[in-house]
């Protein structure tokens, strides 16, 4: 385990809290029903889809992409936490710049929610339900029909 990863593990509760706070700010910003979303993050899907569908992505600057990436990553994480009992964790990733990745773990697997979002950015238009399905398939909480 790298020194960076060890420090990240110690700071994981702060990371998880900041991700949750970002998610809550996203819910408020989209004027979605906070209590309903807290009980079932899928309630946010139509609000989030309408929001991303209306964004002028071709005009985005780097900081706009970073903000959107963070917002969507926190949504994917929160969805997996609430719907599937997932939790934030640290995975060693020697090839990454930091030497580790923040991931969401379930009993059956793990996924990097930011990697899910990055993949989605390469397959425009952004589809919120496709990101959810990708995270669920990657962690193994659901299976493809032909399995």
Image (cartoon, grey):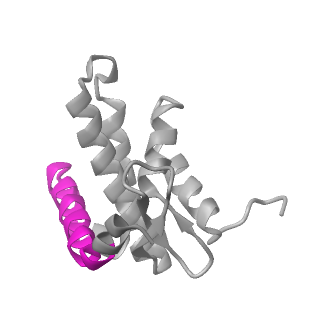
Residue at 58% x, 63% y is 136
- The quarter in which the C terminus is drawn is bottom right
Q: Position of residue 124 (x, y in %)?
A: 49, 29
Q: Position of residue 1 (x, y in %)?
A: 45, 72
Q: Position of residue 97 (x, y in %)?
A: 39, 48
Q: Which residues are magenta?
A: 9-36
Q: Secondary structure of the magenta portion, mostly?
A: helix
Residue at 59% x, 67% y is 139
Q: Position of residue 135 (x, y in %)?
A: 54, 59
Q: Is residue 58 magenta?
A: no
Q: Quadrant of residue 113?
A: bottom left
In this picture, is 42 found above or below 1?
A: above
Residue at 33% x, 36% y is 52
Q: Is residue 78 visible?
A: no
> Which of 81 and 49 lies nearest the eye of the viewer?
81
> Which of 12 and 141 lies nearest the eye of the viewer?
12
Q: Quadrant of residue 65?
A: top left
> Which of 21 and 41 lies nearest the eye of the viewer?
21
**How many numbered circles are shown?**
0
**Relative to 90, 34 lies left or right:** left
Q: Residue furthest right?
A: 146
Residue at 24% x, 74% y is 11
**Relative to 24, 109 lies left or right:** right
Q: Is residue 103 visible?
A: yes
């Amino acid at each position: 385990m790298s020194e960076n990863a060890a420090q990240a593990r110690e700071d994981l509760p702060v990371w998880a809290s900041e991700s949750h706070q970002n998610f809550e700010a996203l819910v408020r910003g989209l004027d979605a029903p906070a209590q309903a979303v807290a009980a079932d993050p899928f309630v946010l899907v139509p609000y989030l889809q309408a929001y991303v569908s209306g964004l002028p992505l071709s005009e985005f600057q780097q900081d706009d992409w970073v903000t959107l990436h963070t917002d969507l990553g926190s949504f994917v994480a929160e969805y997996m936490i609430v719907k599937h009992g997932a939790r934030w964790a640290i995975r060693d990733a020697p090839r990454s710049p930091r030497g580790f990745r923040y991931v969401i773990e379930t009993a059956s697997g793990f996924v990097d929610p930011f990697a899910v979002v990055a993949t989605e950015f390469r397959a425009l238009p952004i589809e919120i339900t496709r990101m959810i399905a990708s995270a669920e398939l990657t962690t193994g909480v659901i299976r493809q029909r032909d399995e």
